[in-house]
Image (tube, rainbow, N blue to C red):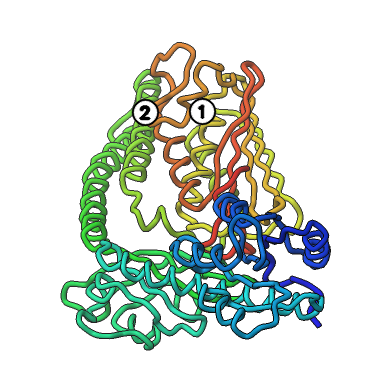
Amino acid sequence: MVDQAETVGGKILIVDDYPANVKLLERNLRSVGYTTVAAYDGAEALEKVQTEHPDLILLDIMLPKIDGYEVCHRLRADETTAVIPIIMITALKEMADRIRGLEAGADDFISKPFDRGELLARVKSLLQIKYYRSMLAEREKFHAVIQDLSHGIIITDADGRIQTISRRAAELLDHAGEDLTGRTLEDALSAFAIGPSLEALQASQARAVTVDLEQRDARSPRYLAGRYTRILGPGGELYNASLVFRDVTDMRQKEKLKRDFLSLVSHKLKTPLTIISGYLNLIDRGKYGEVSPQVAEAIRVTLVKVRELSDLIEKVLTYAGLTATELERAGQLVALEELLGRIRDRVEHRYPNYAIDWRIALSPKLPRARAPEELLSVVLDNLMDNAVKFTHSPQARVEVTAEEIADRRLRIRVRDNGPGIPPEHREQIFTEFTQVEEHFTGSVAGMGLGLSTAKRLVESWGGQIGFESKPGEGSTFFFTVPSEHTPAGDFPKDGR
C-alpha cells in the first residue's frame, strides 16, 4: 500500500459534482502530502486547468454542463495540457464506457467506491509517468533549439553517456559530422586536456563547476571554456549533466600577447628606476665623495619617490594584466598567517618613517583560503597599504582579523584609525582612478586603482567586498574568500 507522496508530490485537480466525494478524495490525498484543487462541473474544470496548472486530474464522467469525456477530449487537443495525466473516477461498469474514456484520452480508471490504497498507488504511478513524459517532450524541443546556437552544448545521462549534442559542440571538439549519441563524454573530449579532470567533475557534488578545455598536440591549440552542470531528478538523484562551452581561443591568444607586452613594459620601466636607485644609494654612502647634509636629505626624498614610482608602476601593471582565466578560477590553498606576515613586512618597508601598530588576529584553527595566492596577496596588500597611507595620526594602527563564517567561507577585515570616508564619496569608493581625500593635494601617492583592483579580484572568486566607516573614526574594509572547505568552482555569489 502507498501511504506517502515522498518522492513525487504535486497538485491534483478533483472534478466531481458531489461535494461529499470531493471532500473524501481531498482527505485521502492531502494526508500524504498532495495539494488539491476542486471543480464541480466540466466548464469549471477547464477553467481550473488553465489557472491552477495541475499535475494530475481526477475526473468524474457524469458532470453537469460538460461531461468528463468532452473535458478529457478538449484537454488532449490542447498542446499545453496534453501531457497532464487523467484518471477517470466513475460508477459506470460497462466496457464500452471505458473504451470511450480511453478514446477521449484518459490514462486510467478507478471505480466507485474506490479503495484508498489503489487510488494513491495509481496517482503516484501516473505522476511519475507524467514527469518523464514532460522531460522527453522538453528534450525534443531542446534538441531542436540548440542546434543553431553559437555555444557548444552536450547533455549526458547519469552515467556520462551522451544523449544530445549540438552541431556547434561537435565542430568545436573536432567531431563534425559524427554521431556521438550513446558514446561517453570522455570519448567526445579525448583530444582536449580538461581542468578540472573529468573524474573530478563527475565525482563532484557541486551543482555547477567552471571548466577549461585545451586541445592537446595541436599546432594551433584551441581553448574552450564553459560550465558543467548536474541536473537532478524529482528525488534529488542525478538525472542528467550538461556541458555548455564556447570557443575562447582568440581571447586566450590576446591575453598572452598582453602578458608578454606587459612583461616587456615592466622590464623597460623598472630597469631605469633600479639604476637610478642604485646610483643614488652609492652617492648617499659617499662612493663619489663626501655628501653634504642638504644633498643627503635631497637623496633621501628622491629615493622615497623612486620607491613610490616603482610601487605605482607595479600596481598599474598588475591591474592591466589580470586575465580572464585568473578572474574565473580560484584553486590554490593559502595559509593566511604566513601571507599576512609577508605583506606586513612589505608594507613596512614602503613606509620607513611611519610608526605602525600592527594587530593581526586570526581565529583558532582557521582553514586555509582557496584562491590564487598572488591575487589574494594583491587584495590584502592594497587594503593594508591604504590603512597606513591614509592615516594622518602620529601612529598608524592597522587591525587585521580573519574568521570562518556560516557557509564555511572566510571573512577578512582590515581596520584603520584614519580619517574615515565622507558619506558623499561612498558610492564611488570602488571606482577606477578614484581617490578620496577631502581636499586632493597629490600628497597621497597612487592613482586610485587599489580598491577597484581589489573589487575585481574578490568578485572573481565569488566573494563580496565592502566597508564600514565614520568620519574621524577610521574605516574597516572587509571581503570574503572561499576556504579549503568550499568546493572548487562552486563559490557562492551572495553576500557578506
| Residue drawn at x 39%, y 82% as measured from the top left | 162
Left or right: 312 as drawn, with respect to 465: left
| Residue drawn at x 49%, y 13% as measured from the top left | 438
Label whose residue precedes the other's in the sequence (1 or 2): 1
Left or right: 42 as drawn, with respect to 268: right
Q: Which residue is mark 2?
A: 433
User: Which is more toward the observer, 130 or 155?
Assistant: 130
Q: Is residue 410 visible?
A: yes
**Image position, residue 255 (x, y; %):** 26, 55
- Element assignment for label 1: helix
User: Which is more toward the observer, 430 or 359?
Assistant: 430
Figure quadrant of residue 275 = top left
Res. 17 mark:
none
**Image position, residue 67 (x, y; %):** 60, 63
Left or right: 136 as drawn, with respect to 246: right
Left or right: 453 as drawn, with respect to 352: left
Amino acid type shown at disc 1: Lys
**Image position, residue 36 (x, y; %):** 72, 58
- Is disc 1 in contact with disc 2, using a CB cutoff of under 8 Å? no
User: Which is more toward the observer, 331 or 448?
Assistant: 331
**Image position, residue 47 (x, y; %):** 57, 51
Amino acid type shown at disc 2: Phe
Q: Which residue is mark 1?
A: 389
Q: Is residue 237 above or below residue 226?
A: below
- Looking at the image, the residue that sits furthest to the left is 219
- Element assignment for label 2: loop
